[in-house]
Amino acid sequence: MKTAGGWKNHTVIGMVMTDPKGKRKPKFFAMVRKHGVKSKDIIQYVHYLKRHLHGRKLILLWDGLTAHTSKETKRFMQTQSYWLTVERLPTDAPEFNPPEHIWSAMKARDMGNIEATSSEDLDRHIRRSMRRVKKSNTLLKGCLRASGLFG
C-alpha cells in the first residue's frame, strides 16, 4: 500500500464560529498545512478569520497548542486586541474544544480508509472532508453541543 503520510504531515487548523449563545448557524473555518502548525501559521489563520468577520469582534477559545502560546503569537495577538479576545480552554480537556469533535468525525467518516497515493491526493481527501463538514449544519451543531459549551 502506498501512503503519503498521515496527520503528522498534513495539519488542519480550524474552528467553529457561532454567536455567544450558540443560536446562529455555525460556520466552520479551516486551513490545511503540510507540516506541523507553527506561530506563522496561527498568525496567517487569524488574518484569514478577520477577513471573514467583516468588522465583527471575535472571542477565540484556544487549546494548549504550543504555537498558540509562543512569544511571536502572543505579541501578534496583543496587536489584535481591538477586535479579538483569546480565552484558554483547559489543556487537559480536549472534549471542551468543538474542533476536536470535528477532527474525530472527519477521521472516522472520510479519512479512515483512504489510500492516498501522493501528498496532493491526501490533500484532496482532506479538503473534500472539510467541504462536507462546512455544509453540515447538523454536524457543526452537534460538535458545539458535544463540547458542552452550548446547549
Image: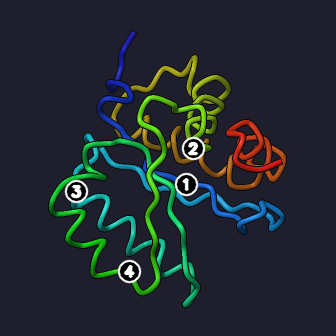
Q: Nearer the viewer, residue 35 or 20?
A: 20
Q: Which badge, 3 or 2, comes first in the chain's sequence?
A: 3
Q: Which badge, 1 or 2, comes first in the chain's sequence?
A: 1
Q: CA distance from mark 4 to mark 2?
A: 23 Å
Q: CA distance from mark 1 to mark 2?
A: 6 Å
Name the residue beneath numbered marker 1. Answer: 15
Q: Where residue 8 appears, x then y in whole percent?
A: 31, 29
The N terminus lies in which quarter of the figure? top left
Q: At 67% from the left edge and 39% from the top edge, which residue is drawn?
A: 147
Residues at badges 4 and 1 in contact (C-beta under 8 Å)? no
Identify the secondary structure beneath mark 2: helix
Identify the secondary structure beneath mark 1: strand
Amino acid beneath label 4: Ser
Q: CA distance from mark 4 to mark 1?
A: 19 Å
Residue 58 sits in quarter = bottom right
Name the residue beneath numbered marker 2. Answer: 99
Identify the secondary structure beneath mark 4: loop
Q: CA distance from mark 3 to mark 4?
A: 17 Å
Name the residue beneath numbered marker 4. Answer: 81
Q: Nearer the viewer, residue 145 or 25?
A: 145
Identify the secondary structure beneath mark 3: helix
Residues at badges 1 and 2 in contact (C-beta under 8 Å)? yes
Mark toward the viewer: 4 or 1: 4
Q: Name the colouring of the figure.
A: rainbow
Residues at badges 3 and 1 in contact (C-beta under 8 Å)? no
Name the residue beneath numbered marker 3. Answer: 39
Q: Where residue 20 appears, x then y in whole percent?
A: 71, 66
Q: Where residue 9 appears, x then y in whole percent?
A: 29, 33
Q: At 41% from the left edge and 50% from the top edge, which residue is drawn?
A: 32
